[in-house]
Image: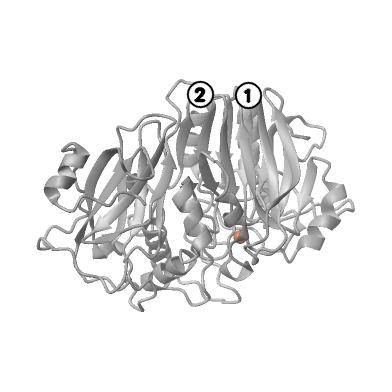
Amino acid sequence: MPRPFATSRRGFLAISGGAVATAAVYGFSAAPAWAAPSFPQNPFTLGVASGDPTSGGVVLWTRLAPEPQAPDGMGGMPPYQVQVSWQVATDPDFRTVVKAGRETATPELAHSVHAEVDGLRPSADYWFRFRIGSEESPVGHTRTAPAAGSVPGRIAFGLASCQSWSGGRYAAYRTMAQEDLDLVVHVGDYTYEGRNHETLADFRNNHAKYKSSVDLQAAHARFPFVVTFDDHEIENNWADGVSQPDGEASNDPQRFLQLRANAFQAYYEHLPLRRPQRPTGPDMVLHRSLDYGNLAKFHVLDTRQYRSDQLTENFPGGPQHPDVYDPSRTLMGDEQEQWLFRGLASSSARWNVIAQQTMMAQYDYDPSETLSVNHDQWDGYVVSRNRLTNFIDQQAPANPVVLSGDWHSAFVNEVLLDHANPDSKVVATEFVGTSISSGCGWAQAIKNGLPANPHTSYINPDKRGWSRCTVTPNEFRSDYLVVPSAADTASPAVVDASFRVENGRAGAQRV
Ligand SMILES: [Fe+2]
């Protein structure tokens, strides 16, 4: 049994050594001092999480929601701000509490808590929990990143994406939570929008539904997550300010920007993100980088918010549109693209991990001479891909490894300098993770196309799961773990295939 929180403020201060952090107040200063409400049930129904580790800190997350599906999206909380205490310890029983503080949880942010903790040791395990009144949260575990400049012998992380609620929940997370990982990288489709989701309450309650999974909660309580969204957190195949509602001719930009603002806010409220990621209306800065010493640098991208609109909707592929070479088109937006180039150029990491959404390497669905590609992926933005591959070729950042999701199918790809020339050099390795639970109704089309894609060494569109990536100075290894049934949480994960990238040599070899 973990040691309970000290019950008095004096005791709490004594445990924390007097170092109570300054509470973050999010623009709601008029509220009265609020005694902790009494709850009909424990308000920590959505679990706890941590995220975006640095060598000295991490952000801790929870949200108070005694009634997580309250129709107004407020989780059954009163319309006041409340104070939530947190503790960080070096042991799961909280015998040695090294940090503690309080945060103000406001109704404006659905009583979510994002406590940014610093002053921790690098490469260290910590346990954390929250308290309000007499109610305590479950205990979470987290781990800080290695010290700046150090070269750790090994880090391991999970690659996750695409966790449709209807696809079965969540055998993959159950198996992941049994591993020893430094972090989990989630590259999008954390939630799937409902057909009529418009309001902030709609998006909040959708997140609360997903967070009711004990297996998703277990993974969040076990590892820090680094997350970026794809399309379904907002709306299928959205692009910048352009909505793509199924079969609807009308697309009111104002309506979509309001929907986007609602979706962004709910996303922030339900994930362990730091303050710079807090959205302002329909804008949210999600691209950022994280350093794991000099072993790995994670460049986390947002390829939805600044992209040019898709050229066609052909699915899963269609004839390549000539405008994929239009230099005015962009997938990342100019600012993010320049940020990525600067980050790659200045990186001193052995492995430059580009964590992003859709598949980067070309994939041709037509085994005949005709090129048939998906225009929602990098294939619809060839000019953007070529700018990146040319940059990598010329600047030679160490070992670029691309992580992708979106397509509900595992792939291992060589990213070529120019996919229009199959003989051009390999500039990066791409691991596309399979989905946690989302199905792949286009599996046969992927299989049919495989002979036309010699740069693709592995596909698996049939199974759900996640990838375990193990990074050492000498190699980047990816084990594709699949579960027999995405819905049967008793099913163990098995390794379907393993690949390794050698230091200094782009492209993966099967282990
Ligand atoms: Fe998806």
Identity of the residue furthest to the front in this view: 1
Q: Which residue does the image show at 54% across and 41% down from the upper left?
A: 181
Residue 14 placement, left or right of 374: left
Q: Is mark 2 within 8 Å of ligand 1?
A: no
The amino acid type of the residue labelled 2 equals Asn
List the residue tagged with mark 2.
294
Residue 289, x across and y down, in percent:
46, 36
Q: Nearer the viewer, mark 1 or mark 2?
A: 2
Q: Position of residue 245 (x, y in %)?
A: 55, 72
Does the rendering let one see residue 322? no
Residue 140, disc: none
Q: How many marks?
A: 2
Identify the residue position indicated by label 1 in the image. 394
Left or right of 131? Residue 406 is right
Q: Residue at x 67, y 27 (%)?
A: 475
Of the residues shown, which amino acid type is indicated by label 1?
Gln
